[in-house]
């Protein structure tokens, strides 16, 4: 089992920045990929970014490419999502996820095995 706990959400004005963190515990040695997803009210959960837990390779949704950066600190078993130039349409609950099997190309929520509780990000325009 892997436990994931997100932090860092909040309210920010458009154009501002936030950094989310996701601390992993438990069987972290088995993690292959960590990802961030988000879900806005009335919409499906969508892929934001993913990172290879060992190699650090990354993958981004087109909607956040150039604005968001995913990174990880293996010593702390923590993955981060630095969000810059935030827009109102980035408002959502952001979820951290871990996969024990798929690589960082995977954008499907169904391929991730463990999920955090989510953290709210609200961008005011």
Image (tube, helix red, strand yellow):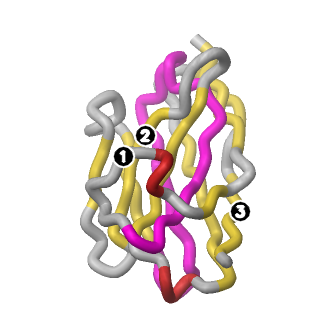
* Residue at (56, 43) in percent of width and height: 18
Nearer the viewer's eye, disc 1 or disc 3?
Answer: 1
* Residue at (64, 57) in percent of width and height: 115
Quadrant assignment for the C terminus: top right
Where is residue 24 drawn, in percent x and y? Answer: 63, 73
Residue placed most toward the observer, 113 or 23: 113
Residue 76 placement: quadrant: bottom right
Asked whether the residues under the numbered discs 1 and 2 touch, taking CB atoms below 8 Å apart as contact, a structural biologist would say yes
- SS for callout 2: strand
Residue 93 placement: quadrant: top right
Residue position for label 3:
5
In the image, the segment drawn in magenta is 73-101
Residue position for label 1:
107
Residue 17 is covered by the magenta coloring = no
Position of residue 57 relative to residue 117, above or below, is below
Label 2, residues with CA under 10 Å away: few <14, some 14-19, many ≥20: many
Residue 75 is covered by the magenta coloring = yes
In the image: residue 111, left or right of residue 21: left
Q: Residue furthest top?
A: 125
Q: CA distance from mark 1 to mark 3?
A: 20 Å
Label 1, residues with CA under 10 Å away: few <14, some 14-19, many ≥20: many
Where is residue 84 drawn, in percent x and y? Answer: 43, 38
* Residue at (61, 85) in percent of width and height: 27
- Answer with mark 2 or mark 3, whichever residue precedes in sequence: 3
Residue position for label 2:
47
Position of residue 80 relative to residue 90, above or below, is below
- Answer with mark 1 or mark 3, whichever residue precedes in sequence: 3
Residue placed most toward the observer, 64 or 100: 100
- Answer with mark 1 or mark 2, whichever residue precedes in sequence: 2
């Amino acid at each position: 089992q892997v436990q994931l706990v997100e932090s860092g959400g909040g309210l920010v004005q458009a154009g501002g920045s936030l950094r989310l963190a996701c601390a992993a515990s438990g069987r972290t040695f088995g993690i292959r990929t960590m990802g961030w997803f988000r879900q806005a009210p009335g919409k499906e959960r969508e892929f934001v970014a993913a990172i290879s837990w060992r190699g650090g390779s990354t993958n981004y949704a087109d909607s956040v490419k150039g604005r968001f950066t995913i990174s990880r600190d293996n010593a702390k078993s923590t993955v981060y999502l630095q969000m810059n130039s935030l827009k109102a349409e980035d408002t959502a609950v952001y979820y951290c996820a871990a996969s024990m099997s798929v690589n960082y190309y995977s954008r499907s929520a169904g391929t991730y095995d463990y999920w955090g509780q989510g953290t709210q990000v609200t961008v005011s325009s």
